[in-house]
Amino acid sequence: MDIINKLKEKQKNPSSAPCVTVAFLGDSITQGCFEIGRDSEGKLKTTNDYENVYHAKFKKIFEKLYPDVPMSIINAGISGTTSWESLERLERDVLIHKPDLCVVSFGANDAHCDGGTREEDFYNSLMEIAKKLKENGSEVIFMSTAMNCTKINPEIKDDGFIKIAHSVREMQTSGRLKKFSDIMGKAAIDSGVVFCDCYRKWEKLFESGVDIDRLLSNNINHPDREMHLLFAVSLVEIIFNN
């Protein structure tokens, strides 16, 4: 990918070459949400950890590889958002920064919204996001999401969270989340952008006997801090291989 050439140029000529900027557009995983709970008023509250979100780990890897390149990261992840909602904020949150590369990661909220009936909206939104990013001069990577819970963890005591867990589990075990991951892969091919299929990597772990549910920080749908490294390393590999 051309971002490697930009990193090389900045490494060689730090005072004259332009800075390198990478934007990440997505949902709660991209925002950096981990555990969930309730605040003093009983409202849903997430623990945000911006040091351990995958794009922070991504940045650290590139700082190790290109120590003279201060990579700028744009965190355009917002919890609970879908691809079509994020298309509306694309200009404000991403395009205005003119990133060299934008990683787009959605799927879980899209597959959950309206019972998973908005497959066409998901595909069309991804196609439009890719189109606008490319017109803005950005390279684009679509990255599929993580697997969600396959069972209900007995540690979940809150009735509201138990209800959410049952709904998310149904989405996972019915194959609906996988279907949306496949739609993202098709949109990547059709729009001519790179596809980083992290969902398939989670599937391979599951097929190999790994207890996926133990890798979720909120026991429902947020990967834990260690598993964010899978996203970071996968992105680095795909960048160097394309």
Image (cartoon, rainbow, N blue to C red):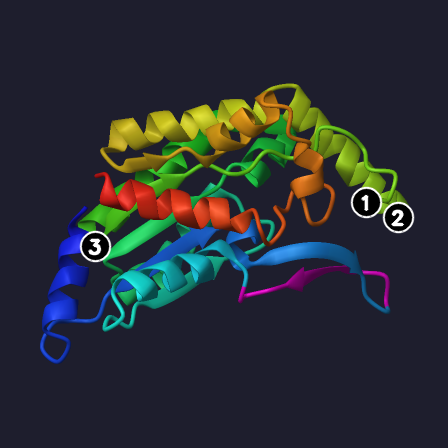
Residue 241, above or below 15: above
Badge 1 marks a residue whose secondary structure is helix
On the rendered structure, is 17 left or right of 108? left
Give the amino acid type for the residue marked by disc 1 in the picture. Phe
Task: Give the Cα separation between the discs numbered 3 and 2.
Answer: 45 Å
On the rendered structure, is 11 left or right of 191? left
Residue 125, above or below 50: above
Give the amino acid type for the residue marked by disc 3 in the picture. Asn
Q: Answer whether residue 74 is magenta in the image.
A: no
Task: Give the Cα separation between the discs numbered 3 and 1.
Answer: 40 Å
- Closer to the N terminus: mark 3 or mark 2? 3
Per the rendering, the mark at residue 136 is: 3
**Residues in magenta, as a range:** 41-51
* Most foreground residue, 220 or 131: 220
Asked if residue 85 can be seen in this view, the reply is no
How many C-alpha atoms fall within 10 Å of the one at disc 1: few (<14), some, or many (≥20)?
Answer: some
Task: Give the Cα separation between the discs numbered 2 and 1.
Answer: 5 Å
Q: Residue at x 22, y 33 (%)?
A: 192
Q: Residue at x 74, y 32 (%)?
A: 167
* Most foreground residue, 73 or 232: 232
Give the amino acid type for the residue marked by disc 2 in the picture. Asp
Q: Residue at x 62, y 57 (%)?
A: 33
Kindly identify which residue carries mark 2: 158
